[in-house]
Amino acid sequence: MSTATLVERPQPLYQALLQQQGRAAGRAIPTPIPIPIPHPLPVVGSRFLIWKQDPSVDPPGLRLSYVPSLVLDGPRDSRIATELPNVTPVHANTNRDFIFAPGTPEADCAHTFAVVRETLAMYQRIRGGAAIPWAWNIGGNADPITAFPRAGVTANAFYSRGLKALKFFYFTPANATQPVYTCHSLDIVSHECGHAVLDGLKPGWLGATNPPQTGGLHESFGDLTAIFLACSQLDQVDAAVAMTKANLHDRNFLAALAEQFGAALGSPQGLRNADNDLKLSQVGNEVHAISQVFTGAMYHVLADIFAFEKNRQAAVKDPTRVLLEVASCLCKLLVEAIVKAPPVGATYADVVNQMLAISKAQGDPAIYRTFLRNRFTEREVVVSPVPLTAMAEGRMNLADPNYTEGQDLVKMEARKHAADQAPQDRSACCGTMQLPEYMLGDQKKLEKGVVIVEEDMIAAEVAELKKMFAR
C-alpha cells in the first residue's frame, strides 16, 4: 500500500463543491497533498506471558508483559540467561515475542527471564540507569546470572553467588496431584533476584558471621523487592487500589507474599505477611523472623506516605498514580540508604538513619521522616527521644531540652537487644541464606572470569559492561 492511500482525500462530489465555492469566491481550492508517513524504526523488545503474582492470585492473573530491550533466544541477554535441559534455548516467534501455553517448560523459561529482567531493570532505573553488577562482576568480569526455572524437586528456591545462578524448584504438596512450581511466583522469583541484586551492591552482607540484623536486611530486601516490583507495574497497582479502595491495610496481594507456596504449606496468608506488627523483642536471632520486622515497618511507611499523598493530591492525581510514585520514591530511598550503609555488620538503625538523612537532604516533606521514625520506633529498632505523639505533633522539646520545637531528627539511637550479640539462626530462611557458601565466613574474592559471546548483537553491550565493572 502506498503512503498516498493512507491519507484521507475528499470525496469527488465534495471536492467539486469546494472548487465551485472557491471559484465563486475568486480563489482556487488546492488539492490536498498527502504527507509521507515516516518509515518506522525497527521494533526492539519482546512480549512475555507471565503470572503477575502467583497462579492462585486473580486479579491481576496471567498477562502480557513487555521487555523493551533486546532479548535473544534462550531467552537471554547480556545480563541474564535461562537454562532448562532439553528445552533451552527457547526460540522467540517471528515477532520476537516469547509467548507460550502456560505451564509448559518454554513458558516457565520465558516467565522466569521476564521477572528477573524486570527486577533488575527496576533497580537500575531508580539508580539513574547505571548497571548494577552481579557479585562476580569484578575485575572486568561481565558474566550473566543464569536462571534455572525447573532446577529439581524440593520446596525451595535460592540464589548462589558461586554458581552465578538463580534456582527455582518444584514439589507436589501432600494430598495434591499437581506440582507447585516456585518459578511461577513473581514474588519468589523477584525475592531471589533481590538477594542477587543486594549481593552485587553489598557483597559483605551475606556471610553468616554478620549480626542477625544484617541477615534480616537480606531476607527483608528480597520480600520488599517483590512488593516494589508489583508496585512498579500499573496493572498490579490498579488492581490493588481497586481491591482495597486505596487502603493498603485491607487484605491484598501486595502484602501477602508467595500465596500459592504458602497455601501448599498450610498458610492461607502466604509465606509471609508484610502488613504485620512484629517487634524485635519478639523475634530473637532467627533471621527469617527478624526480616519481617523491617519489612513490616517499611510496608507501614509505604501505607502512611500513600495515605498522606493520596489525600493531599486527590484533586490532581488518581490514587493509582500516587501509589506508583510513592512506591518508586520509597524504593529509591531504601536502595540509596543501603548503598551508604556499612559494608559489613549493618544494622536496621544504620539503614534507617541513612534513609532519614537522605530524605531530609532531598527535600521530602518532613512528615515522611515522621512516618519513618514512628514506625521503626514502634518496632523497637530505634529509640525516640520523645513520646511518639509528641514527635508526630512536632513538639520535640518535651523530654529533652536539647531538642527544640519542631526539630527534624535525622539520626536516632539504635535500641539494644540481647539477640544483637547472638549468632545468626538461618533455620527458617529461604534457600539462599542456607547455602553452605555463605555459612563459612567471608568469601574469597572471585577470580577474573572470561565471557564468551556467540552473537555479535550483544557483544558491544558486554564490552561496555566489562569496562564498567573493571572500575
Image (cartoon, rainbow, N blue to C red):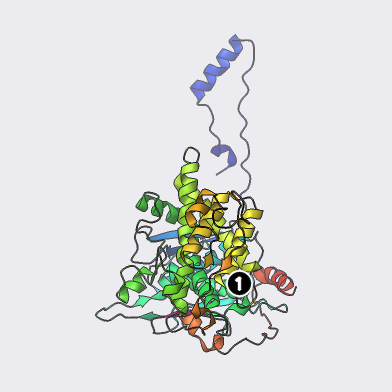
For the image, the number of numbered tags is: 1
Q: Position of residue 430 (x, y in %)?
A: 45, 79
Q: Is residue 30 visible?
A: yes
Q: Is residue 80 visible?
A: no
Q: Position of residue 319 (x, y in %)?
A: 45, 46
Q: Depth check: 33 or 68 in front?
A: 68
What residue do we see at 58% from left, 37% from top?
A: 4
Q: Depth check: 455 or 430 in front?
A: 430
Q: Residues within 10 Å of mark 1 (few under 14, many from 20)?
A: many
Quadrant showing the C terminus = bottom right
Q: Is residue 1 left or right of residue 103?
A: right
Question: In which quarter of the view is residue 283 placed?
Answer: bottom left
Amino acid tagged 1:
Arg
What residue do we see at 31% from left, 75% from top?
A: 264
Q: Position of residue 159 (x, y in %)?
A: 52, 79
Local secondary structure at mark 1 = loop
The residue pinned by badge 1 equals 79
For the record, the magenta segment spans 154-159
| View extreme (left): residue | 175
What residue do we see at 34% from left, 60% from top?
A: 58
Question: In which quarter of the view is residue 429 placed?
Answer: bottom left
Q: Position of residue 141 (x, y in %)?
A: 69, 78
Q: Depth check: 440 or 294 in front?
A: 294
Quadrant showing the N terminus = top right
Q: Is residue 143 left or right of residue 177?
A: right
Q: Is residue 34 above or below residue 381?
A: above
Q: Is residue 187 left or right of residue 37?
A: left
Q: Is residue 19 above or below residue 406?
A: above
Does residue 158 belong to the magenta stretch? yes
What residue do we see at 59% from left, 59% from top?
A: 333
Does residue 295 belong to the magenta stretch? no
